[in-house]
Image (cartoon, rainbow, N blue to C red):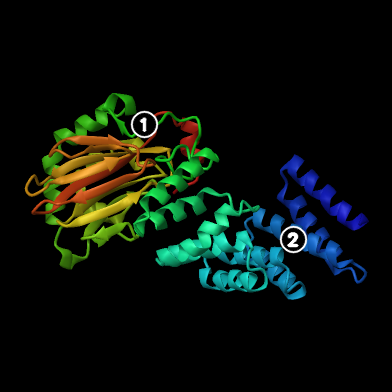
């Protein structure tokens, strides 16, 4: 116990001094505890779990995985240990191995809520909505430690909606908001700055982008014409949307800026990118994108939310068909449409949905900008998304 106490003291000192060197010493101290021949099993488990936690904090994810693998060998039927191993695999993107671990947990402990939500999450990401509900729903309602995260309610609600259980989806979203996991049943982004004001649609004045809107609207035909030249699908420039948001139809995108960095595609639309270079809060938005978006007739985009409330999304209408039943955007409970040459601004951290029921394609330019309440310091320090 004395050695474990030393390791804990080193951790406290490392936190006070913000020292990675001391944190490394702390990790080694936990390891020494676990290697003692006389170390009781309960203390060994605690030391190795804590070691893995500190390794994860340092970003040493594969080292943490090795530690948890050792734990799983020594405690092969311990649900907590196995669950932590599953999480370690998830953190390095090895979802299939994580799936096997959580399945093993449920073989040993069928009612384990933690394993259920994580297994349901993996299955949902792979696109099996019905099966994911079988695990996510009892998992979140178990209220067990580790089950009350926004992402589980987010994916459970989405799976319910996509399987026509819309009322149940709405109830899950409401419950997530009541439990403080979402800002509201409509605003379900997970990477937020809490103090930011929010509303589904914004005016240029509210968003503090009056000059940007004027530039875009003044030059919309130039921006449109460059996009039209790039639309030959055979060139592979417009690529299919890859976030599994389409219910029906075809939706392609051509990215110019992402996470605050210019894409090489800008060389193909130099006039457009020259205009955008005059908009630092757009091209420098590390939590956003700038891209052309083309949507074909018969397309429906599932209700979904963006990842963060730190940005606002501008849509510049370039080719907006009015034939058939037209094109519509719902954000929260407000439905609007686009106009050619005009900018529409909304907060995509709110649930939004699109219908393209016209007789020809719809083309817009999407420009994300920093939320007006984000500080200059936050623009530099917020992690990219």
| Residue 133, numbered label | none
Q: Position of residue 111 (x, y in %)?
A: 63, 64
| Residue at figure coordinates x 75%, y 56% from the top left | 24
Camera-side residue: 65 or 307?
Answer: 307
Q: What quarter of the picture does the N terminus occupy?
A: bottom right
In this picture, residue 289 sits left or right of residue 110: left
| Residue at figure coordinates x 62%, y 70% from the top left | 106
| Residue 49, numbered label | 2
In this picture, residue 368 sits left or right of residue 380: left
Residue 91 can be seen in this image:
no
Camera-side residue: 243 or 367?
Answer: 243
Residue 241 can be seen in this image:
yes
Q: Is residue 47 above or below residue 379?
A: below
Q: Position of residue 220 (x, y in %)?
A: 14, 39
* Secondary structure of residue under mark 1: loop
> Can you identify the residue that label 1 sits on?
199
State if disc 1 and disc 2 touch (CB < 8 Å): no
Binning the other alpha carbons within 10 Å of mark 2 as few (below 14), some (14 to 19) or many (20 upward) gives many
Q: Position of residue 161 (x, y in %)?
A: 37, 54
Which of disc 1 and disc 2 is earlier in sequence? 2
């Amino acid at each position: 116990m004395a050695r474990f106490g030393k390791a804990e003291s080193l951790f406290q000192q490392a936190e006070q001094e913000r020292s990675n060197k001391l944190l490394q010493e702390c990790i080694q101290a936990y390891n020494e505890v676990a290697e003692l021949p006389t170390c009781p099993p309960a203390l060994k488990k605690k030391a190795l779990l804590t070691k893995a936690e500190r390794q994860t904090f340092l970003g040493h994810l594969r080292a943490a995985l090795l530690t948890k693998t050792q734990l799983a060998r020594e405690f092969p039927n311990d649900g907590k240990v196995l669950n932590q191993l599953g999480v370690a695999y998830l953190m390095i993107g090895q979802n299939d191995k994580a799936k096997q671990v959580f399945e093993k947990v449920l073989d040993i402990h069928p009612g384990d809520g933690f394993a259920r939500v994580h297994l349901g999450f993996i299955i949902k990401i792979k696109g099996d909505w019905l099966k994911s509900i079988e695990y996510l729903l009892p998992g979140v309602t178990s209220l067990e430690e580790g089950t009350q995260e926004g992402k589980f309610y987010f994916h459970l609600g989405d799976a319910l909606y996509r399987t026509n259980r819309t009322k149940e989806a709405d109830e899950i979203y409401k419950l997530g908001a009541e439990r403080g996991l979402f800002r509201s049943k409509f605003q379900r982004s997970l990477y937020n700055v809490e103090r930011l004001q929010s509303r589904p649609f914004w005016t240029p004045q509210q968003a503090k982008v009056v000059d940007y809107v004027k530039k875009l609207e003044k030059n919309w035909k130039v921006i449109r014409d460059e996009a039209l030249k790039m639309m030959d699908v055979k060139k592979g420039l417009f690529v299919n949307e890859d976030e599994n948001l389409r219910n029906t139809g075809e939706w392609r995108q051509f990215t110019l800026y992402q996470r605050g960095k210019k894409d090489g595609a800008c060389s193909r639309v130099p006039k457009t990118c020259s205009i955008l270079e005059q908009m630092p809060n757009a091209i420098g938005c590390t939590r956003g994108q700038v891209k052309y978006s083309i949507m074909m007739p018969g397309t429906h985009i599932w209700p979904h939310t963006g990842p963060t409330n730190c940005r606002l999304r501008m849509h510049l209408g370039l080719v907006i068909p009015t034939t058939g039943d037209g094109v519509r955007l719902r954000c929260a409970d407000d439905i609007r449409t686009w106009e050619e040459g005009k900018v529409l601004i909304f907060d995509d951290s709110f649930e939004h949905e699109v219908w393209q029921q016209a007789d020809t394609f719809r083309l817009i330019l999407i420009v994300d900008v920093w939320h007006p309440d984000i500080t200059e310091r936050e623009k530099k320090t917020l992690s990219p998304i």
